[in-house]
Image (cartoon, rainbow, N blue to C red):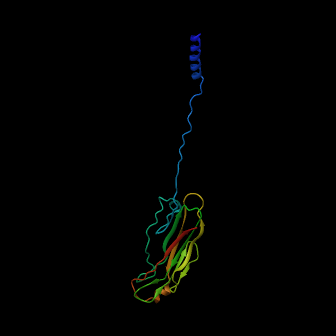
Amino acid sequence: MKKTIAILLVLAVVMTGLFAAPPTAGDATLTLNGKVGAVLKHGLSDSTMGVESIKDAALYTPGATSEKVLFDAESVKENVKVFYSYMTNWKGTVTATAKFNPLASADVDTKVGYTVKIGADTPTAVASSDANKAIVLFNGVSTGTAGFAGAEKELVFNADAADYKAAAAADNYTATVTFEIAAN
């Protein structure tokens, strides 16, 4: 009888092992994180960049246009062009403003005004008496909700012929135009 009980115990233990539930493991998880930094760039170039270049952060490289000649010792130049552009991935709006000053020389008291045509707008005069005349280039432009956006405007400058004729001789007439941009 002892043998029978021992055999039954051995069978019970073996049978329990055979019909026991298989072992389980919990799920393994991986969390991926990322961050996209806000980008807001603007600049000037001598030629149009095109919409696709403006929208691509890797391609957006406006030229370092920092100087244009409106007149020289003999004549007034006509339709002097420069292109202003911006690009951003900001979800909101963008406002870009330029502040224009007349051409002046440190050597003489006369100043030379000019007109600036921005995009398809009517030309705006920057008079010889103006100082930091603010003109809005882009006003509250929606940048959308996904990816990079941007825009470009052509600026065409023409010196005021009457101011040029009335100006005293000097070879260092300059004007500063300051471009500002803000995301809202």
Q: Please, which residue is most extreme toward the top here? A: 1
29 vs 54: above or below: above
34 vs 182: above or below: above
Q: Position of residue 91 (x, y in %)?
A: 58, 61
In what quadrant of the picture does the C terminus appear?
Answer: bottom right
Q: How many numbered discs sit on the rendered protein?
A: 0
- Please give the name of the residue rendered at 49% of the width and 85% of the height, measured from the top-left corner: 161
- Please give the name of the residue rendered at 56% of the width and 57% of the height, measured from the top-left corner: 147
| Residue toward you, 66 or 165 | 66
Q: Please, which residue is most extreme toward the front here? A: 2
| Residue toward you, 35 or 65 | 35
Q: Position of residue 119 (x, y in %)?
A: 56, 71
Relative placement, left or right, of 108 versus 52 is left
Q: Position of residue 141 (x, y in %)?
A: 59, 67
Q: Position of residue 58 (x, y in %)?
A: 47, 58
110 vs 137: above or below: below
Q: Choose top left, top right, bottom left or bottom right for residue 75.
A: bottom left
43 vs 125: above or below: above
In what quadrant of the picture does the N terminus appear?
Answer: top right
| Residue toward you, 84 or 35 | 35
| Residue toward you, 163 or 93 | 93
